[in-house]
Image (cartoon, helix red, strand yellow):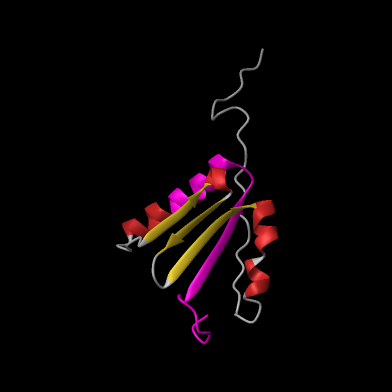
Protein backbone atom coordinates (compact mmCIF):
# COMPACT_ATOMS: atom_id res chain seq x y z
CA UNK A 1 0.00 0.00 0.00
CA UNK A 2 3.05 2.29 -0.01
CA UNK A 3 2.12 3.82 -3.38
CA UNK A 4 -1.38 4.75 -2.14
CA UNK A 5 -2.07 7.86 -0.05
CA UNK A 6 -3.08 6.18 3.21
CA UNK A 7 -2.48 6.35 6.90
CA UNK A 8 -0.47 3.11 6.96
CA UNK A 9 1.74 0.94 4.77
CA UNK A 10 -0.02 -2.37 5.44
CA UNK A 11 -3.44 -3.68 6.42
CA UNK A 12 -3.62 -7.11 7.98
CA UNK A 13 -7.15 -8.48 7.68
CA UNK A 14 -8.16 -11.61 9.57
CA UNK A 15 -11.41 -13.19 10.65
CA UNK A 16 -12.70 -15.69 13.16
CA UNK A 17 -15.89 -17.60 13.86
CA UNK A 18 -16.47 -16.69 17.53
CA UNK A 19 -15.74 -14.01 20.12
CA UNK A 20 -13.08 -16.12 21.89
CA UNK A 21 -11.36 -16.83 18.56
CA UNK A 22 -11.37 -13.15 17.56
CA UNK A 23 -9.98 -12.17 20.96
CA UNK A 24 -7.31 -14.87 20.67
CA UNK A 25 -6.24 -13.71 17.20
CA UNK A 26 -5.99 -10.06 18.31
CA UNK A 27 -4.19 -11.03 21.53
CA UNK A 28 -1.71 -13.18 19.60
CA UNK A 29 -0.95 -10.32 17.19
CA UNK A 30 -0.39 -7.97 20.15
CA UNK A 31 1.85 -10.42 22.02
CA UNK A 32 3.99 -11.28 18.98
CA UNK A 33 4.50 -7.63 18.02
CA UNK A 34 5.22 -6.60 21.63
CA UNK A 35 7.90 -9.32 21.74
CA UNK A 36 9.44 -7.70 18.65
CA UNK A 37 9.44 -4.26 20.26
CA UNK A 38 6.50 -2.85 18.29
CA UNK A 39 4.35 -0.29 20.08
CA UNK A 40 0.56 -0.49 19.92
CA UNK A 41 -0.67 3.07 19.32
CA UNK A 42 -4.39 2.39 19.46
CA UNK A 43 -6.82 -0.47 19.98
CA UNK A 44 -10.46 -0.11 19.06
CA UNK A 45 -13.49 -2.37 19.19
CA UNK A 46 -13.84 -5.77 20.81
CA UNK A 47 -15.08 -9.22 19.89
CA UNK A 48 -18.57 -8.41 21.22
CA UNK A 49 -18.65 -5.52 18.73
CA UNK A 50 -17.69 -8.11 16.05
CA UNK A 51 -14.44 -6.31 15.15
CA UNK A 52 -11.06 -5.37 16.67
CA UNK A 53 -8.60 -2.87 15.20
CA UNK A 54 -4.93 -2.77 16.27
CA UNK A 55 -2.99 0.28 15.07
CA UNK A 56 0.81 -0.01 15.02
CA UNK A 57 1.41 3.07 12.88
CA UNK A 58 2.71 1.61 9.61
CA UNK A 59 0.61 -1.53 10.09
CA UNK A 60 -3.08 -1.72 11.00
CA UNK A 61 -4.61 -5.10 11.82
CA UNK A 62 -8.36 -5.70 11.52
CA UNK A 63 -9.84 -8.83 13.11
CA UNK A 64 -13.48 -9.44 12.18
CA UNK A 65 -16.21 -12.01 12.59
CA UNK A 66 -16.36 -13.76 9.22
CA UNK A 67 -19.76 -12.26 8.29
CA UNK A 68 -18.70 -8.77 9.46
CA UNK A 69 -15.59 -9.04 7.31
CA UNK A 70 -17.75 -9.88 4.29
CA UNK A 71 -20.06 -6.94 5.08
CA UNK A 72 -17.29 -4.31 5.27
CA UNK A 73 -15.29 -5.96 2.46
CA UNK A 74 -12.07 -3.99 3.02
CA UNK A 75 -10.40 -6.12 0.35
CA UNK A 76 -12.75 -4.57 -2.24
CA UNK A 77 -12.29 -1.06 -0.82
CA UNK A 78 -8.51 -1.37 -1.31
CA UNK A 79 -8.89 -3.40 -4.50
CA UNK A 80 -6.00 -1.68 -6.31
CA UNK A 81 -3.50 -2.39 -3.53
CA UNK A 82 -1.21 -5.41 -3.90
CA UNK A 83 -2.27 -8.42 -1.84
CA UNK A 84 -0.47 -11.22 -0.10
CA UNK A 85 -2.64 -14.15 0.93
CA UNK A 86 -1.63 -16.63 3.58
CA UNK A 87 -3.02 -20.10 3.69
CA UNK A 88 -5.09 -21.05 6.66
CA UNK A 89 -3.36 -23.30 9.14
CA UNK A 90 -5.53 -25.88 10.85
CA UNK A 91 -4.19 -27.88 13.73
CA UNK A 92 -4.86 -31.56 13.95
CA UNK A 93 -7.24 -32.47 16.71
CA UNK A 94 -5.96 -34.95 19.25
CA UNK A 95 -8.80 -37.20 20.31
CA UNK A 96 -6.82 -38.99 23.02
CA UNK A 97 -5.24 -35.86 24.51
CA UNK A 98 -1.77 -37.30 24.03
CA UNK A 99 -2.47 -40.52 25.94
CA UNK A 100 -2.17 -43.95 24.44
CA UNK A 101 -5.27 -46.09 24.43
CA UNK A 102 -5.06 -49.32 26.37
CA UNK A 103 -5.98 -52.52 24.65
CA UNK A 104 -8.05 -55.05 26.56
* Left-right relation of 44 to 51: left
Q: Is residue 12 magenta?
A: yes
Q: Viewer-proximal residue, 88 or 22?
A: 22
* Left-right relation of 47 to 79: left
At 62% across and 76% down in the image, what residue appears? 78
**Quadrant including the C terminus:** top right
The residue most toward the bottom is 3
Name above or below for residue 29 compared with residue 55. Answer: above
Q: Viewer-proximal residue, 79 or 7?
A: 7
State which region is magenta: 1-28
The residue most toward the left is 37
Q: Viewer-proximal residue, 85 or 67?
A: 67
Tell me where residue 39 sits by quadrant.
Answer: bottom left
Count of numbered labels shown in the rendering: 0
Tell me where residue 14 sits by quadrant.
Answer: bottom right
* Left-right relation of 80 to 12: right
Q: Viewer-proximal residue, 38 or 8?
A: 8
Q: Position of residue 40 (x, y in %)?
A: 35, 60
Q: Is residue 54 magenta?
A: no
Q: Position of residue 101 (x, y in %)?
A: 61, 22
Q: Position of residue 74 (x, y in %)?
A: 63, 67
The residue most toward the top is 104
At 54% across and 45% down in the image, what residue appears? 47
Name above or below for residue 7 compared with residue 103. Answer: below
At 53% across and 60% down in the image, what residue appears? 62
Name above or below for residue 58 compared with residue 39. Answer: below
At 65% across and 17% down in the image, what residue appears? 103
Q: Position of residue 46 (x, y in %)?
A: 50, 48
Amino acid sequence: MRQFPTICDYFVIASGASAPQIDAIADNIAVKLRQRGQRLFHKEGNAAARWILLDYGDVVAHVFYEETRRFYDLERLWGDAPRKRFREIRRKKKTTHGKKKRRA
